[in-house]
Image: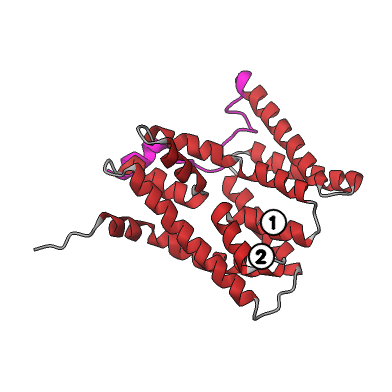
Amino acid sequence: MENVKPRWREVLDISMPLCLSYIPIGLACGILLHAAGFSWILTTLVSLLVFSGGAQFMIASMLVANAPMHTILIMLFFLELRYALLGSSLSQYMRGTSKKFLYLFAASLNDENYAVNYLKFATDKGWTPKDALMVEHYSLLFWTGANLVGSLIGNMIKINLDIVDFALTALFLYMIVMQIKNVLTIFISLLSAVLAIIAMVLIKSTMGLVVATLLASLVGFMVEDYLVKHGHAKGFLLKKIKPKASRKVISKSGE
């Protein structure tokens, strides 16, 4: 007689590649947060409440740079604003769930577990919101555990704080490259860099980063809106750099 795995074990098997990938980056994040002055308790709380590698690396970097708290909060707000879009794309699969469930689901959503759940919803008719929530909680558990271990390791070794800036720069370069889909994205990325330098020099504060982010986002929105409304959606600036798999394409590949 064939042994049937319990559902929690099946979901764990599905999410295990994601969970294991969190270990090295989670350790590094915990070490850097400790170097920035976080105790293991604060590191654990940040991991549970923020649950975002990019945001946590940014927190460590800006604290090392002595950035004021309001600047850090504003930067976190704009950095994490993308989750509103990610969550809305999963809303069609969350029908019939309670507000409490939606709160728990939203609180533990991040880029990686979103990708796993979106693919499963698109290709597996048996995938349920409860399964998706388990994926989020498994990934949260591994991420928090890796952060905690990293923080404890940080007590035993000395870290040159210059590496914090390097790690954050490398991380955000990676995030930019992964989001490049047309020439306009490249243009706005370069514009953001130039505006950030100018704003930092003029304002002489990390608030310059916030100003540069807002201006570049506004310019990007206005240019894209103008091109689409005037029938230039297939023009040079909006020409695709790489193919983008749609839900329909993903669904067909899973058949």
Can you identify the residue that label 2 sits on?
A: 33
Q: Amino acid at mark 1?
A: Ile
The residues colored magenta run 228-255
As drawn, 215 above or below 142: above
Depth order, front residue of 141/202: 141
Q: Residue at x 67, y 63 (%)?
A: 167
Which residue is the extreme one toward the top? 230
Which residue is the extreme one toward the left? 1
SS state under label 1: helix
How far apart marks 1 and 2 lie (CA) works out to 8 Å
Can you identify the residue that label 1 sits on?
A: 59
Quadrant housing the N terminus: bottom left
- Does 26 appear in magenta? no
Q: Residue 33 in the image: x percent, y percent? A: 66, 65
Q: Amino acid at mark 2?
A: Leu
- Does 229 appear in magenta? yes
Q: Residue at x 57, y 52 (%)?
A: 49
